[in-house]
Image (tube, rainbow, N blue to C red):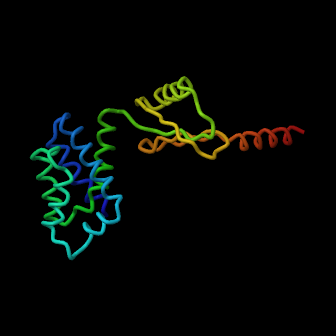
């Protein structure tokens, strides 16, 4: 339910925004979303004791001088309707919509080995051929004995496990006898 409500706000914000404003709004919404990771902020925003005006002041103070009239009015409308708690969901959806418009996505590679820049570039090129989208991959260390590539916004998850390949090879050999 929360996602459906947030989607309407996102559509309204993006409809009134230029490309330059969109990138500014993404930065503002992402910083607000990070602030919502704090339990204190969540408590204040979700508290029925704290007035909507105080909640609005808290959020607008966090935005500071970075925000223009549109984003300020957007946040005021959220506060009037008691929807400030939707800011993290709105931030996530705005990021997804901007990625769709630009056809550029972020992905991660999880591996216990460090990959070279050429290997990462080769994976990005392969994914570009497969999806038709620009994909920028970043590497994270993990305890996977192999490789896992994930581009969440496109629903792509590919993994190669040395143990699984080894087991499939053994099964193939057993079947051939």
At 30% across and 42% down in the image, what residue appears?
97
Most extreme residue toward the top is 118
Residue 86, by quadrant, is: bottom left
Residue 74: x %, y % from top left: 15, 53
> 163 or 64, which is in the foreground?
64
Most extreme residue toward the left is 69
At 53% across and 29% down in the image, what residue appears?
120
In the rendered view, does 11 fall on the left or right side of 106?
left
Residue 57: x %, y % from top left: 14, 60
What is the total number of numbered labels drawn onto the structure image?
0
- In the displayed structure, 58 sits above or below 131; it is below
Q: Quadrant where the C terminus lies?
A: top right
Q: Quadrant where the N terminus lies?
A: bottom left
Most extreme residue toward the bottom is 49
Residue 161: x %, y % from top left: 67, 42
- In the displayed structure, 144 sits above or below 138; it is below
At 31% across and 49% down in the image, what residue appears?
93
Residue 75: x %, y % from top left: 16, 55
Residue 111, by quadrant, is: top right
Residue 100, by quadrant, is: top left
At 30% across and 62% down in the image, what residue appears?
2
> 169 or 107, which is in the foreground?
107
């Amino acid at each position: 339910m929360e996602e459906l409500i947030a989607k309407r706000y996102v559509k309204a914000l993006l409809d009134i925004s230029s490309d330059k404003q969109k990138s500014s709004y993404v930065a503002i919404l992402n910083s607000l979303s990070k602030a919502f990771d704090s339990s204190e902020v969540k408590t204040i925003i979700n508290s029925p004791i704290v007035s909507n005006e105080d909640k609005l002041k808290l959020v607008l103070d966090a935005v500071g001088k970075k925000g223009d009239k549109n984003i300020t009015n957007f946040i005021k409308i959220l506060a009037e309707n008691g929807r400030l708690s939707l800011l993290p969901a709105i931030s996530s959806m705005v990021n997804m919509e901007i990625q769709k418009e630009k056809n550029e996505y972020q992905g991660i590679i999880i591996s216990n080995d460090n990959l070279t820049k050429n290997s990462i570039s080769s994976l990005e090129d392969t994914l570009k051929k497969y999806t038709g989208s620009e994909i920028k991959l970043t590497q994270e260390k993990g305890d996977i004995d192999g490789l896992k590539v994930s581009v969440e916004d496109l629903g792509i998850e590919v993994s190669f496990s040395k143990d699984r390949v080894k087991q499939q090879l053994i099964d193939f050999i057993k079947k051939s006898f």
